[in-house]
Image (spheres, rainbow, N blue to C red):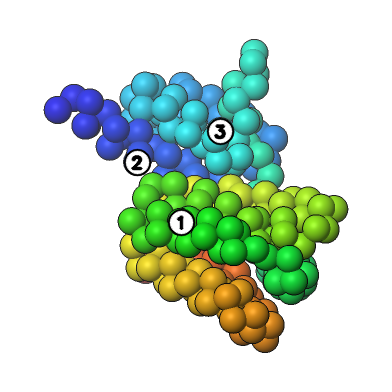
């Protein structure tokens, strides 16, 4: 029972600190001091420490030896919109190039990843990423694939820190199925459309998230 309570407190601390960072209440470069957070959140040091470790994994903060937790610099909403415009343009191009080289074995691997995502696992986002880059790597354009990875990583903190709801996963899974079908049929226009839609779906989740965070209670 105590373990469950501690986990719940850690999750609460994680969500509060996360939202304060994204709202700009904790500025990039500022230190997150355990003693101050204890008083501010009215939560014990143990759960807060666990929350900071989890936030470090998202990239929102960095736990630096002898300095403690330092707030990172998440992309602004305006930056995110530009990043997603670039992602759609680049990833659609990579998909088009990949279509010429995609093999039957690649399709089987995509179907295996798709089947794994149907189970709505906790690492759904990680499998999703592998799904896309299995396609893009077939483009034989490694430099552009590296740029696509950098663009994805630039919003990685926002893609990772929110638990994907089942309804989101189901939507992504349906879109991935359409991508596979377009590749099988060698339907270029359908592939371009489905890749773009799938990327835009991720952006919509981020928009919804920001709208929830910045909403001022009446």
Q: Residue at x 77, y 55 (%)?
A: 145
Disc 2 packing (10 Å; few <14; some 14–19; many ≥20): some
Which residue occupies the foreground of this view, 139 or 46?
139
Tell me residue 207's x, y (percent): 54, 68
For disc 3, the marked residue is: 56
The residues bearing labels 1 and 3 have C-alpha atoms spaced at a distance of 31 Å
Quarter of the image with the C terminus is bottom left
Q: Residue at x 35, y 39 (%)?
A: 11
Disc 3 packing (10 Å; few <14; some 14–19; many ≥20): some
Q: Are marks 1 and 3 in contact (CB under 8 Å)?
A: no
Quarter of the image with the N terminus is top left
Q: Quadrant of residue 70?
A: top right
**Nearer-N-terminus badge (1/3):** 3
Which residue occupies the foreground of this view, 170 or 9?
170
Helix, strand or loop for disc 3: helix
**Nearer-N-terminus badge (2/3):** 2
For disc 1, the marked residue is: 112
Helix, strand or loop for disc 2: helix
Badge nearest the viewer, 1 or 2: 1
Relative side of 167 to 102, left or right? left
Helix, strand or loop for disc 1: helix
Relative side of 89 to 117, left or right? right
Badge nearest the viewer, 2 or 3: 3
Relative side of 23 to 38, left or right? right
Q: Is residue 115 visible?
A: yes
Q: Are marks 1 and 2 in contact (CB under 8 Å)?
A: no
The residues bearing labels 2 and 3 have C-alpha atoms spaced at a distance of 16 Å
Q: Residue at x 44, y 67 (%)?
A: 173
Tell me residue 185's x, y (percent): 59, 81
Tell me residue 214's x, y (percent): 50, 62
């Amino acid at each position: 029972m105590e373990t469950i309570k501690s986990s719940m407190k850690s999750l609460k601390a994680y969500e509060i600190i996360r939202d304060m960072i994204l709202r700009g209440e904790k500025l990039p470069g500022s230190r997150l001091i355990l003693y101050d957070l204890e008083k501010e959140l009215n939560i014990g040091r143990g759960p807060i420490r666990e929350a900071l470790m989890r936030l470090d994994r998202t990239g929102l903060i960095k736990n630096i030896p002898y300095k403690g937790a330092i707030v990172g610099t998440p992309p602004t909403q305006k930056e995110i919109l530009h990043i997603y415009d670039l992602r759609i343009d680049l990833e659609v191009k990579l998909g088009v190039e990949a279509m010429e080289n995609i093999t039957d074995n690649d399709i089987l691997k995509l179907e295996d990843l798709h089947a794994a995502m149907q189970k709505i696992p906790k690492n759904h986002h990680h499998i999703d990423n592998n799904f896309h880059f299995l396609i893009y790597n077939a483009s034989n354009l490694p430099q552009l694939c590296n740029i696509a990875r950098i663009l994805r990583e630039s919003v990685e903190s926002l893609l990772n820190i929110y638990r994907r709801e089942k309804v989101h996963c189901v939507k992504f899974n349906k879109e991935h199925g359409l991508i596979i079908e377009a590749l099988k049929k060698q339907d270029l226009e359908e592939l371009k459309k489905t890749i773009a839609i799938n990327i835009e779906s991720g952006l919509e989740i981020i928009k919804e998230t920001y709208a929830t965070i910045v909403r001022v209670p009446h």
